[in-house]
Image (cartoon, helix red, strand yellow):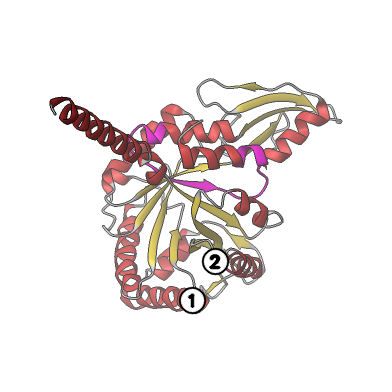
Amino acid sequence: MKKSIMFFLAICMIAVIIIWYTENSNEDKEDLYLSVWNVYWDTENVDYEIELLRDAAKEISYFAAYFDSNNNIFIPEKTEKTFEYTSTNFSGKDYDHYLTIVNDKINIDGSSSLKDTKLLYELFLNEKTMEEHIEEILKLVMEEGYDGVEIDYENIKKDMDLWDLFADFCNKLYFRLAENNIKMRIVLGPTAPLQDIRLPVGPDYVMMCYNLYGKHSGPGPKADEGFILDLVDRMDYIEGKKYFAFATGGFDWDNQGEIWAITEKEAKDILKKYNITPKRDEKSKSITFNYIDENNVEHEVWFADGKTLTFWMDIVRKRGNNNFSLWRLNGNTEESLYKIDKYIKTVEI
């Protein structure tokens, strides 16, 4: 009898251990969260890349709606078509669809004003103009059928007066959207003075963990470990759900002062064309190489692949943050997207 009791207790203990292990081994799988951007100027293979990430991605942001010469928001036709295609053909996948709104403006003469802070001052001029802007956003998103709004108003830099107006706008917009069951997310640049501004509690926040090097600088990676850790620390000033965004692709710098943004596929086409063996940078896990083109111009290229992106994500995850955004769809290799998908689902690099 005593042996039977001991055997029963042993079986129970084993069962408890199995249940505990199963539940805890799935924690990372359940916690990791991926949002992806698609852009209106490059939509050729978006459906294919969404398909490759369909089990990992939970949200799609449609980049972007912007402003006409009268400060009215409009959505480019390609953005509308991509949203229509995705929401129809991936209807079995329960994505949250966000409309990203940026402070870019088309002027009367047809020229563009990017990241226009003068536009923001006009929108936030007084209570009336701010309220009109909020109501325009609400009406547009409800009519088009998006689940959420993503505000990506950039170039505020150290303008604390504009930051105060922006925070007031975000607070009011959040409550107006919440009344209509519409989600809200705010994109922040890496130079945002988070310790000095009071952003509202309620919206989700996305930190852009890229542009360490780019068109504003000489050659280098879009991010590295030190850069990412600094941004993770600074996001402690923000309350609420936080996303950390990482950028695909990279840049090509030549010795004539020209700089091009390139996708991963474009970078690998250059490697193949010039029969180059690249190297992987230790601090950033980015791929880098040099080449001389047909015009005898020297180039230096830095770009990210799946190993780079999952390395960056893992830096953030090890600090207890599990929400990621990927800038952007299109131009990525199947191998890299598979690696990201696997990482999000299994936390294995």
- Give the residue displayed 44% in from the left and 33% down from the top: 314
Against 82, residue 318 (above or below) is above
Query: What residue occupies the far front of the structure in this picture?
Result: 1
Q: Which mark is residue 65?
A: 2
Label 2 neighbour load within 10 Å: few <14, some 14-19, many 20+? many
Contact? badges 2 and 1 (CB < 8 Å): yes
- Secondary structure of the residue carrying tag 2 is strand
Query: What residue occupies the far left of the structure in this picture?
Result: 2
Question: What kind of residue is marked 1?
Answer: Leu
Q: Is residue 236 visible?
A: yes
Q: Nearer the viewer, residue 191 or 96?
A: 96
**Residue 89 lies in the magenta stretch:** no
Q: Nearer the viewer, residue 232 or 13?
A: 13
Is 6 on the left or on the right of 177, as rendered? Answer: left
Q: Nearer the viewer, residue 293 or 308?
A: 308
* Residue 86 horizontal/vertical position (percent): 60, 64
Q: Which of the two labelled residues, at mark 2 and mark 1, occupies the earlier sequence position?
A: 2
Is 312 on the left or on the right of 131, as rendered? Answer: right
Q: Which residue is mark 1?
A: 140
